[in-house]
Image: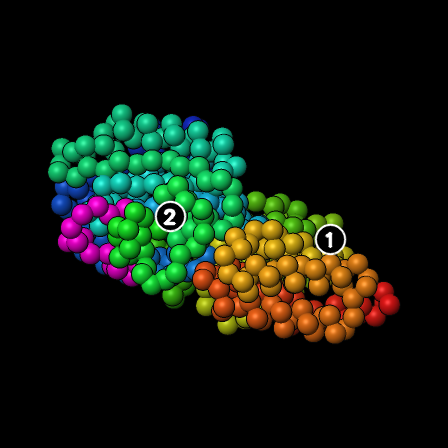
Amino acid sequence: MKLDQVCLRTRDLENPAALKTYEDLGGYKQLQRVVSGDISPEEIIALLKSSGLRGRGGAGFPTGLKWSFISRDMPGQKYVICNADESEPGTCKDREILRLNPHQLIEGMAIACYAFDATVGYIYFRGEFYEIFKVCEQAVKEAYDAGYLGKNIFNSDFSVDMYNVKSGGAYICGEETALMNALEGKRGNPRFKPPFPASFGLYGRPTTVNNVETLASVPLILEKSPQWFADMGVERSGGTKIFSISGHVNKPGNYEVPLGIPFAELLDLAGGMQNGARLKAVIPGGSSAPVLPADIMMKLNMDFDSLAQAGSMLGSGAVIVIDDSTSMVKVLQRISHFYMHESCGQCTPCREGTGWVSRLVDKIANGSGTLQDVDLLGKVAKNIEGRTICAFGEAAAWPVAGMLKHFYNEFADHVKHNN
């Protein structure tokens, strides 16, 4: 099995982030094809649809379909935003692309701008990405100096400007409408939808927001063909995926592999379990994904539909591996404290509910909880879900639901043994 075929293909090269390195791989040739008229905007979207590319940020929405929501013929300014505000606990893939292959992202964004007749793109960075931000600033400068950004690219009528922007470091700004509010200089609170960003986005103009990995996949799909990309994955989950594997494994890190790979093979790539421990559970898609026990995970393939059918989600591809020495009560305590801290406070069910959840888990973990508290924990989490402006409520509630579904007895035993 070949690794690192798409977004991390520069990983083992000398000076991976340099413009010359990317040009030697055929970089910016697809942008040239696009602006020369070899591939029309409609054809770009059709190619993405047939490739099976789905959003790599968490939701897994089909990228070609999302791009079709913006009309190129709509007059006035339009925007393309790359969501690089990678803040989901366990996720560390986008920073790897930004550090090692920034020009492929820039080319993907420029192609997206051409598809929508947008002339401005923003890369919105997590605030803590200081060194990576400098790498991307250099890459944008190189792209301008080479004529790949700016006015009349490849002597065409197409012009695009691109800007790198650092966030203030808030998890909620990874939500696309909160991100746009932050870009506008407002508090990073999510917006009500509708209207949706495709019609009313940044500065009230049509906008599309995609993840780093999603946009960086676009040039390779145009170069190699959508069928090449689709065939690397499985039905309804085309292409490769970068899985960030952490926890109790021997070789934690980022692994770009075909979608649909069995979890057992992915675990082997990460060197297996640390110290020969037994696998207890896996959080397969970042901290907001419901946990799954070992007996289920070892039978699963890593693609969108397989994980959804098992009651969890692929999410961002952050695979958190947990061994049998770990208290699931302590795991949920850490997760629930994070979501209480990161709630923007705009919605009452989320603002109050995440606090209730965190305090209840603390009570259980500290040995003063009761079985009634365990049951109340599930009810409080359920009352957050589906009652908030954005999906943060679900992100806070699903970890609780997963823990109580698969490890209720552990919570109950913890209560009994501490009373």
Q: Is residue 293 magenta?
A: no
Residue 319 location (% of width, % of height): 57, 54
Closer to us: 156 or 80? 80
In the image, taking residue 393 as reference, residue 400 lies left or right, namely: right
Q: Which residue is mark 2?
A: 180
What label does residue 276 carry, if any? Answer: 1
Sequence-wise, the earlier of marks 2 and 1 is 2
- State the residue at coordinates (39%, 48%): 181
Q: Give left or right: position of 111 versus 400.
A: left
Residue at position x 83%, y 70% from top? 416
Who's the residue at 38% across and 66% down the image? 235
Answer above or below: position of 249 versus 16.
below
Q: Is residue 45 above or below residue 307?
A: above
Q: Residue at x 73, y 59 (%)?
A: 362
Task: Using a 10 Å C-alpha cutoff, classify the residue at mark 1 as few (fewer than 14 neighbours), some (14 to 19) or many (20 or more).
Answer: few
Residues in magenta, as a range: 65-79
What type is the residue that disc 2 sits on?
A: Met
In this view, 285 is above or below 11: below
Which quarter of the rendering shows the C terminus?
bottom right
* Corner quadrant of residue 325: bottom right
Q: Is residue 191 visible?
A: yes
Q: Residue furthest top?
A: 145
Q: Secondary structure at mark 2?
A: helix
Crowd rating for badge 2 (residues with CA inside 10 Å; few <14, some 14–19, many 20+): many
275 or 343: nearer the viewer? 343
Please say whether residue 68 is one of the residues in the magenta stretch. Answer: yes
Q: Position of residue 380 (x, y in %)?
A: 62, 69
